[in-house]
Amino acid sequence: MASIDTLTLPLDQTSAAEVAAVGLEYARVDADGDGFRPFQRAVARGFLGGESTDDEAANSRKTLRTRRLTGVFDRAGSEPEVPVGTIDSWASTLTTSPGRTTDLWSISAVTVAPTHRRRGIARAMIGGELRTAAAAGFALAGLTVTEATIYGRWGFSPAAWASDVVVDARRARWTGPTAPGRLDFIPRDGIAERLHAIHERVRVRRPGSVPGWDGRWRGVAGVAPGDKEAEKVRAVVYRDVDGAERGILVYTLDETDDYSAHDLSVRALFADGDDAYAALWRFAIEHDLVGRVKAWLQAPVPPVQWMVADRRAVTATLTDHHWLRVLDVAGALTSRAYAAPLELIVRVDDPLGFAEGTWAVRIDDAGEAAVDAASADSAVDVDLTVGALGSLLLGGVRATELASAGLVRGDARTLAALDAAFAPAATPLLDIWY
């Protein structure tokens, strides 16, 4: 289903009616039409960015012409062509367990102009996306968030966390493995292709991951228009003893007051295997004239902490990153493999109705799930919110933890069995923004 052309799906009429009731217009935007630059202007305002140049706009079109761009317009305003609300979406895939993926309705560029708050614009736009996704057969929707207080009201909840890592290179001292392969610098015009190739191998083994796209990789590589640090971008690849490229590190160096202690900022570090991971991190930590290494969107507990003499030289700040919204309980739960057998009746509370219901969940000894609707009068073993179900799905959080917060209800033995079944084969991680 990820190959579905979402541009052919109709505009949600419920959302259109909701915004019309407050004097606004809900409409699609053509990335190749005159409305694209005003749409970009609205998105830039929403995220406090600057106006795009012609070259930057042309570069963005390469990605956005395949996405559903939707705007809310105030035609009575001084800029009637600039939307006061924006959202874009596309069909993607989510890794749910190593080697298993499912279709994902991805959402991005959600903005509401500060001049038009409290008019139900966000409710209409996000609700429209969820209704469209559910009608098209998607079991899950997902997004990354800048503000953590917004999306819970629509049933989204964190499902994969990431760490921002800072390493004091002067304290760290490498004690980790010595990789048998080799490192080589590569030219900037070859970075994007290699990022794509290595990330594609890595992301299908990591729950919570999604595929990147050419525009994302060109941005990381410093070859997209408007990158003020483009000339600073450098990259090395790790090749194993057979000459296969197994990892890539893309970074910049920034001067500090101490010229012998630059900041090395990691734009991307993707490693296909332990040797590649160790080699790339060692390169970064032992780089000449570097005092600090900064890397974002790393594993929640980054393995590099175990590869240096002073583990407190590594600071990892955990944050929620990938938020999921379950639209179809059976589709979501059968999309992954499980660690232990389980049989129970689950009741899901969903105020928006998509996932509302009672479900019989059976996981066999092979880790495969079967999910069927149960009668409303069935004896329920576990009662939970739709947000809690989204957080549990990839195994990144335990049911017993959510029970402490009142989001999951069940007896201790049942919740322990649920945790055992949902335990992930790999810690969930989303290593890009989308």
Image (spheres, rainbow, N blue to C red):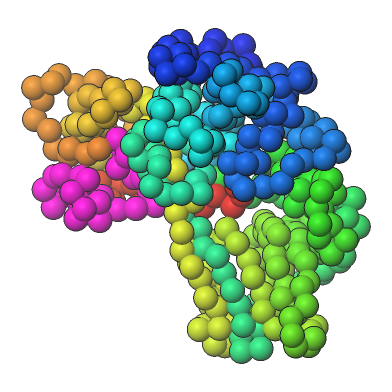
Residue at (57%, 58%) from the top-left corner? Answer: 297
Residue 234 x %, y %:
83, 63
Camera-side residue of 103 and 33: 33
Q: Is residue 308 left or right of residue 409?
A: right
Q: Residue 275: x percent and y percent? A: 68, 67
Q: Residue at x 82, y 68 (%)?
A: 183
Residue 421 in view here: yes
Q: Which residues are magenta?
A: 386-415
Q: Residue at x 13, y 52 (%)?
A: 412
Quadrant containing the N terminus is: top right
Quadrant, the C terminus? top right
Q: Is residue 394 magenta?
A: yes
**Quadrant of res 357:** top left
Q: Is residue 264 left or right of residue 71?
A: right
Q: Quadrant location of residue 111?
A: top right
Residue 136 position (above or below residue 162): above
| Res 84 → quadrant | top right
Locate residue 94, reporting x and y percent: 53, 37
Left-right relation of 366 to 297 = left
Was residue 323 drawn as part of the magenta stretch in this picture? Answer: no
Image coordinates of residue 173 in percent, x first then y, are 64, 87
